[in-house]
Amino acid sequence: MVAGWLRAVALDGPQAPGMGTVPDEATRIAGPRRDEEGGPRRRWWERPWVLGAVVLAVLAIPLVVTLAVLAEPRWYPSLDMAQTELRVRDVPTSDAPLIGLAGRIGTEAQQGSHPGPLSFWALWPFYALFGSSSWALQAAAAALNLVAVGLTLWLAHRRGGVPLLLGAGVALALVLRAYGPELLTEAWNPYLPMLWWVAFLFAAWSVAARDRVALPVAVFAGSYCMQTHISYLGLVAGFVGLGVLVLGFQAWRDRSDGAARRRTLLWVGGSAALGLLLWLPPVAQELTTDRGNLSIIRDHFSDPPEEPIGFGEGVEVMLRELNPVRLGSHVLADSWVVSPTLIPGAVVLLVWLLAVAMAWRLRHRELLRLHAVLGLTVVLGVASIARIFGIRWHYLSLWTFSTCALLLLATAWTAAGAVRARRGPMTARGARLGGLALAGVIAAWSLSFAIGEAPDARLRDAHDSVGLAALVPSTVEALAAGDLPGNGEEGRYLVTWNDPVGLGAQGYGMVSELERAGFHAGTIEPFRERATEHRAFDAADADARVHMQTSRDPQAWPERGDAVAVASFDPRSDAEREEFERLRSEVVEGLVERGADDELVLKVDENLFGASLDERIPERLRGLMVNMLDLGLATTVFVGEAT
């Protein structure tokens, strides 16, 4: 089997001038296969699709290990992850989501969401297949990422045969390990498009090469990225605009070729229909409500609440994140790790520009198309980063790391083409050794990932999950008994919370877990954009209230009345509670000494997370607040009358 694959490497070599011609307009840089030349046909296990499946399986090993590690103890999703699971759960119902996850878009009075629900719809089949549990959501995220990897490998083979399939496999192995096990198994909307962005770039390259089969992939992958997270909107939109021009030019060139024109119309028409279908939900929401989400997005970014960081900082961020050293280390799971220097990124771009010049000298159309796609990516990327305003969260430019890997791949492939143009075609033995080396890198890098980082995978919201694990079972048991307001599963439960340290993270988790247990649960109207519209209702429409009080003394809930405490949890030891109080006293005293107003001082107890982000807070006190957030507070769950 391996020998057959190595023969395929020898037969599917990248072409340069003088080494053969491209056989058709869809153009792989692959030479003709043996069975296309009249020679002996390859046995089924020697065919490239089998090799592609094996490469995909090897790349999947770390994700499988990660899912096995995360299976126990049970995960309790909170905040965005709970909101995501609620929407995925809604997909097969009459309340199917029409827009994306709520984001930092719009105003407090009119909060916007990310453009579309495609990620929820794409997750649902896998979520249902794996059992509709919280773990199933993680498995669904991993499965979607592997679909993107598989499509990328397929497109790579269409463009460059087995050699490029293996080269893309190496690039993907680097990217997968750099992103790490946590990001690849978490269905958070900034993480879900990371690998689909790679598939989109390969599809865009294929479309530029007149490979019409890639058009639907480009439409789906681009729509998936754009709808799932707003940071991809400008990137993909730029490609769409240029793509329309390219397709129009290609159609004009084909005007005298009836067969080519019909083929183009078929694929373009079908892909356009797919695009309309994928964008129907957000457009329907825009047209049928008085709070159109697309309008909120337009208004928010056309008149941002803060000044964007600008072109200069956009270039700096791009250079920092094109650092190839970061691809060799598992650092992306750490939100705040940044490259300390611009030099590696500048070197990557400089060497890549030399590769572009070499491809131009070789008149290598396939390479030039790839370089054009990557060049457009860099330009659009800088423009996109330059438009960031407010805090530059790490997840706003995660696509830069896979872009760096593709720049390296394109540079290496150009170098290989230049060597072959100078020395002539590679011998069969040399091609086999080269293929074996690439396969070895894929296997070694993927297995080291599976053995090294994957077994140490940890939940990124473990603190909230531990708290919910302590609170949810007792709450469910108390409600199911039927002797509290709400009368068990017959009731409608309004979940409310006071959470100064977690943005209500566990509150959304409680809504999701009560619903999983068979209860009709929702929350108050101000949270409708996050909890979904049909889960938001007034106290007058509820039969009982489930309140989560998080504070220094949660038993002293001012509105307790006759409500019964059914669960309580404090993540801190006695020593940690004392440390929290010491830190609080130091923070409050520090603010008072600096003349802070009463509102800011009160914010330490009422919204510690928000206070820690306040620009008026000195860095030393901000550090103390972060320590307080890490320690956490106690939470008690009460059940009582709704009003």
Image (tube, helix red, strand yellow):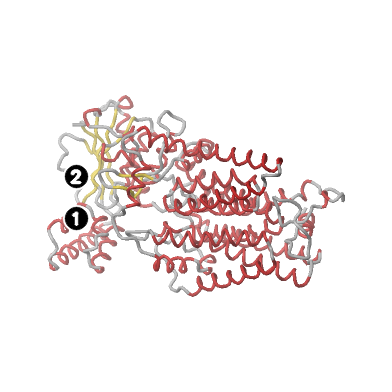
Q: Which of the 4 image quarters holds residue 267?
A: top right
Identify the residue at image location x=55%, y=72%. 350
Position of residue 2 measured from the top left corner of the image (x, y, whole percent): 76, 56
The residue sitting at 67% across, 54% down in the picture is: 159
**Residue type, mark 1 in image:** Lys
- Residue 555 is labelled as 2
Check disc 2 and report its element: helix, strand or loop. helix
Disc on res. 603: 1
Q: Secondary structure at mark 1?
A: helix
Question: In the picture shown, does residue 454 fall above or below 536?
Answer: below
Please identify the residue farthest to the front as the structure is shown. 256
Q: At which x and y percent is residue 89?
A: 43, 35
Q: Is residue 48 left or right of residue 579?
A: right
Query: Which corner quadrant of the image does residue 308 belong to?
Result: bottom left
For the C terminus, the image quarter is: top left
Question: Looking at the image, is mark 2 or mark 1 earlier in the sequence?
Answer: 2
Number of callouts: 2
Q: Nearer the viewer, residue 476 or 316?
A: 316
Q: Which residue is nearer to you in this view: 39 or 189?
A: 39
Q: Do labels 2 and 1 touch, CB within 8 Å?
A: no
The residue depicted at 75 percent of the width and 68 percent of the height is 420
Q: From the viewer's perspective, is 120 left or right of 560?
A: right
Q: Which of label 2 and label 1 is nearer to you?
A: 1
